């Protein structure tokens, strides 16, 4: 395939485009040689075109999701199907994620009722014991590539993202 063709150097700006076409494109290729190129690239482009048809308002966000989440450090996508938190606008949850690693050694406990019933705790010691047993357990989630902490995962295996870029 390599040939030792020499192309004349022309300083004309009008012919500069023709010069580069001759330099980078082999005009002597036959139809048989072109058919040897895999069709994977054409399939890839056609599948992307189909995805754009099924998208919602923004052409980047697939339908059925609130946002695409990316790592804040390296901008690599984490999840394509997410749901926005009802109270906190910067938090999202997802079930299907990619490039995430769960750190099972970092166990996080959260007790929602403890904050609400802080005054009752001093009044009733029994209530205090009940609140401790109602804790939810979470584990830290980091991005595999760069190690940035991006989420936590609960016991139901739902990822709760908080440190991400939203698109």
Image: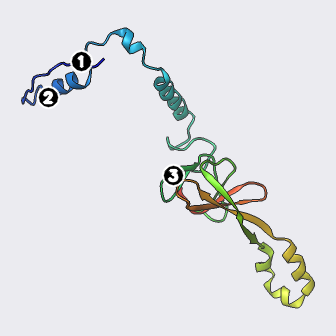
State the CA–CA distance, disc 2 to disc 1: 21 Å
Above/below status of 160 relative to 119: above
Q: In the image shown, does 5 or 130 lie closer to the viewer?
A: 5
Q: Position of residue 134 (x, y in %)?
A: 85, 71
Q: Position of residue 147 (x, y in %)?
A: 56, 60
Query: Residue under circle 1?
Result: 3
Query: Residue under circle 2?
Result: 16
Q: What residue is at 56 percent from the left and 41 percent from the top?
A: 56
Q: What residue is at 12 percent from the left and 25 percent from the top?
A: 15
Q: Secondary structure at mark 3?
A: loop
Q: Answer yes or no: do the residues labelled 1 and 3 have beta carbons within 8 Å?
A: no
| Tag in front: 1 or 3 | 1
Q: Which mark is residue 167?
A: 3
Image side of residue 12 versus residue 155, left or right: left
Whether residue 68 is visible, yes or no, is: no
Image side of residue 34 versus residue 95, left or right: left
State the CA–CA distance, disc 3 to disc 2: 41 Å
Q: Secondary structure at mark 2?
A: helix
Q: Earlier in the sequence, mark 1 or mark 3?
A: 1
State the CA–CA distance, disc 1 to disc 3: 47 Å
Residue 122, quarter of picture: bottom right
Instruction: State which quarter of the image contains the N terminus.
Output: top left
Image side of residue 147 versus residue 34, left or right: right
Q: What residue is at 70 percent from the left and 50 percent from the top?
A: 95
């Amino acid at each position: 395939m390599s040939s030792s063709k020499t192309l004349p150097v022309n300083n004309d700006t009008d012919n500069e485009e023709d010069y580069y076409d001759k330099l980078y494109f082999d005009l002597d290729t036959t139809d048989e040689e072109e058919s040897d190129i895999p069709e994977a690239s054409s399939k890839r482009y056609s599948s992307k075109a189909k995805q754009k048809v099924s998208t919602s308002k923004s052409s980047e966000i697939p339908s059925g999701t609130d946002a695409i989440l990316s790592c804040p450090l390296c901008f690599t996508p984490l999840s394509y199907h997410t749901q926005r938190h009802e109270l906190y606008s910067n938090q999202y949850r997802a079930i299907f994620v990619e490039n995430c690693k769960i750190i099972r050694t970092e166990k996080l406990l959260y007790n929602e009722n403890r904050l609400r019933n802080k005054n009752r705790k001093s009044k009733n010691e029994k209530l205090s014991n009940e609140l401790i047993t109602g804790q939810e357990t979470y584990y830290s989630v980091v991005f595999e590539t760069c190690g940035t902490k991006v989420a936590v995962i609960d016991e139901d295996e739902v990822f709760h993202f908080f440190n991400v870029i939203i698109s």
